[in-house]
Each structure stands twice: as structure tokens, then as C-alpha cells.
Amino acid sequence: MDVEKKVPEQDQGKKEERGLDKKKYAFTIDYKGCGRSIVAAPFVNKILTSNEKIERDIHEARLRGGMAFEAFSPDAKLRQQMIAHLVQSLVERPDWAKSLGDIEDINLIMKIYEEVMKHEDTFRESGKD
């Protein structure tokens, strides 16, 4: 499966100059909800290294403000996990997505996160026999 399937055709020839490979994935998001309409918002996700996963976990702990993970509702835990991961893995994103914690609409964050997880699942599957 080609992980860059969502890169528009006109950009396919540019993937080398953009540094896209199986560890990086360009995609766009279309979204309408909570008074917001987004069309073809560009993102580039990368597979995290072990050190970057540690940084993600540190960021998630900072979002909790030193409180125990169990102290938060399931929704809050999910939001913290998604935001911490996206902050580390999205190497390119639109200006409105620079501060993901300021986005009120959890459905928009989930849509971005789901696309990132699809890339990571595809990357992991590509290494199997």
C-alpha cells in the first residue's frame, strides 16, 4: 500500500524535494463543524523515533499539570493523548493548527489524529512479511 496516496497528483513529482518517504505522509483535511469550514488543509506527519515518543509522553504529562492520569475523565485523557501525539508528529500544519490545545472542537482534532494513526498503522504493516 502506498502511504502517500492522499498527496495530490500534481505534488507526486515533488515528494523527493519535500522529503516524503514511508516515514512521512502528506495529507489534507476537509472539515465542517462547530462554525468552522476547512477545505484541503495540508499536513505532513512523521513516524516518531523512540526519543520523540519520550518527548510526546513528557508533553502529555505537562498537559495533565502533574495530576495522575486516573484523575481525568476518559474524554480529557483522550484529548491529552491526541494533542501530545500530534504536537510531536505533525511536521507541517496550517497556521490555525499550530496551537492544537486551543482548538475547541474535539471532532476536528480526532479527524486529524485518525489520519495520523492510519499512516502509522500502514507504516507498521509495511515492515511485516
Image: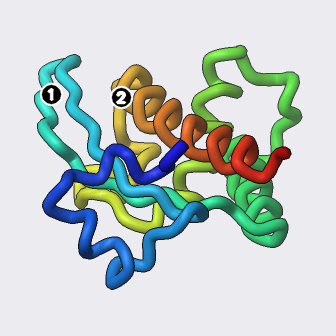
Q: Residue 108's mark? A: 2
The reply, left or right, for residue 125 in relation to residue 117 is right
- Relative image position of residue 77 (x, y in whole percent): 70, 27
Mark 2 and mark 1 in contact? Answer it, CB < 8 Å: yes
Is residue 102 positioned above or below 42 on the image? above
**35 or 115: nearer the eye?**
115
Q: On the image, numbered disc 1 is attached to which residue?
A: 36
**88 or 15: nearer the eye?**
15
- Corner quadrant of residue 6: top left
Amino acid type of the residue that numbered disc 2 sits on in the rendered structure: Leu
- Relative image position of residue 25 (x, y in whole percent): 46, 57
- Relative image position of residue 51 (x, y in whole percent): 81, 71
Q: Quadrant of the image for the C terminus?
A: top right
Residue that appears at 77% across and 60% down: 53
* Mark 1, other Cα within 10 Å: few <14 / some 14–19 / many ≥20: few
Give the Cα distance between marks 2 and 1.
10 Å
Name the image colouring.
rainbow
Residue that appears at 21% across and 32% down: 30
